[in-house]
Image: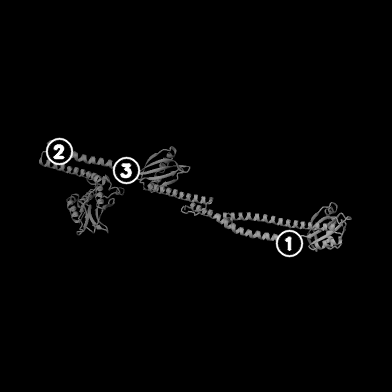
Amino acid sequence: MMKRLNSVVIKLWLTIILIVTTVLILLSAALITFIQNYYTQDTEQSLIKDAERISILLEESDNKSLAIKHSKALIEGPSGLIIMKNKNDEFYNSHSKLKNEMMNVITKNSKYQKVFTDNKKISQHIKLKVDGKVRTYVLLGYPTKIDANNPHGAVFIYQDLKSIDDTNNVITIIILVTAVIFLIITTVFAFFLSSRITKPLRQLRTQALNLSEGDYSQVNDINSKDEIGELAHSFNIMSSDIQRHIDEISASKNIRDSLINSMVEGVLGINEKREIILSNEMAKKMSEQLRTTKKEQFTEQMDRTFKEKEIQFQDYEVNNRFYVVIMSYIEQFQPNQSGVVAIIRDMTNEHQLDQMKKDFIANVSHELRTPIALLQGYTESIVDGVVSEPDEIRDSLSIVLDETQRLNRLVNELLNVARMDAEGLSVNKEVQPIDPLLERMQMKYRQQAEDLQIDINLAPNTEGQLWYYDTDRMEQVLTNLVDNASRYTSPGDAIKISTSESDKYDILYVTDTGSGIAPEHIDLVFDRFYKVDASRKRGKEGTGLGLFICRMIIEAQGGTIDLKSRLGEGTTFIIKLPKPPENI
């Protein structure tokens, strides 16, 4: 109910009705009063004229009785007539009960005595009780000179106002009915008018509510030329401007979010209440690790940033991972709030790369120094004549040749990696059986298997199955894998190659029963320069480039290489090569 009363339509409707009702009431009251006064004054004027005519008739007539008779015949009926010679004597003593009441009023009312004494016209409304009912009469006293013996006579005429009251009542009813009809018409018109006037406002209200709920597409169709039309036009412009600004803000926000989420670094926005306002997925992962293990250090860096309002750098090491956090102070991060933006960079790869480069330089230096020292020593021995016997010279030259080949292998691996980085890796894939390659690998390592006392089975029978691969590159991969396996095995262990297939790939398994690889090394063994713990390796260390080169060769042929390993149980390398295309 209160909601309806608060409606603009109802308020405007009630206002119009109230104004019209007030005007109608005042106008009706004025009309009724005017009409009542008009008829009353008209009646009094009519009585005065009748009294004046009777007075003239009595003064000029010689036969007073006849004149009085004619006057009574003319007047009495709707009105009553009393003619008095003086204030105590009446001409025509034919009284009714009403006339007696009137005579009683005339003789007792001091105002009517002035008609006889001062020759004044006196008119009054008097109320008399006739037949048990109170009625209002107009009683007019008019001075007259009847004859020389009666110079102070008077003519009294009275008339019942009931007919005037009845007329006034009829007129009042007519006016009131007319006012009610006008009020009803006004009510309908006011409701229609208020609805028409407020319809644009209701449309604007609906549009405003839609705006508040985020719907900026609605446009009003108000085309009036008044202030409401101008307001509606301004509202449409405002709505389109808001929509445009929202779209621009949304686009900027989407771009910002896309940029932030696509960043390799983690991004955190923290206000002065230490609430995270902005973050990407990378930041969530990194910050969880930092907050669980380095919470105090992270909080201290944040407090220092808020206090000094300068960029703060901090390094963190968490579970063998390395992070650097860069915090920058922002004065207006949120309305009336400052904040900091933290950039979290995972520097683990860089740290490991630096470490591997250091290790690589040390290893290469060691690998180069050892054969060079041997070459120098044996060569000097031969040159200086320390070794003079033919058998000793042959043995020394054999060692020199072996070390020279070792140096050549090391330099070739380094050149291969440099060439891959500079030019990429080229492969020449052909559809051919895999059996010849595997048989060649078996022959290649037969003598080494006897020397190392390990069981090597590298040639499973594939029954001539056609594979799609580069022979030279795959021999390089298998040689590297078998060499690595031989370094991590002991006498009595085994190395074997097996095959299988899936819908899309031909699969090679290179398996050994050696010492295996620790879990923390499994994800890193294919990285450049990476070498596992040398304490479990037999023979000389490599350069840390072999498995990296293997991965590059397999990926260049469209395949994948992976491994499974458990400490003390051995390792399996899994090579997947795409099957030959059907149109070849």
Residue 575 coordinates in the image, percent (x, y)? 25, 53
| Marks 3/2: CA–CA distance | 42 Å
> Residue 263, image x and y in percent?
36, 46
Residue at horizontal 23 percent and vertical 58 percent from the top: 583
- Residue 276 visible? The answer is yes
- Callout 1: SS: helix
Q: Secondary structure at mark 3?
A: helix
Front residue of this view, candidates 310 and 525: 310
Number of numbered discs: 3
- Residue 510 position within the rendered picture, expressed as x and y whole percent measured from the top left: 24, 53
Q: Are marks 3 and 2 in contact (CB under 8 Å)?
A: no
Q: Nearer the viewer, residue 508 or 82?
A: 82
Instruction: Tell me if I can see residue 103 in this picture.
Output: no
- What residue does disc 1 label? 166
Q: Residues within 10 Å of mark 1 (few under 14, many from 20)?
A: few
Q: Residue at point 42% right, 44% down? A: 269
Residue assigned mark 2 = 379
Q: Quadrant of the C terminus?
A: bottom left
Which mark sits nearer the N-terminus, 1 or 2? 1
* Amino acid on which the number 2 mark rests in the picture: Thr
Q: Residue lying farthest top?
A: 384
Image quarter hosting the N terminus: bottom right
Of the two numbered discs 3 and 2 on the same chain, state the one appearing first in sequence.
Answer: 3
Quarter occupied by residue 309: top left
Q: Earlier in the sequence, mark 3 or mark 1?
A: 1
Residue at which label 3 appears:
350
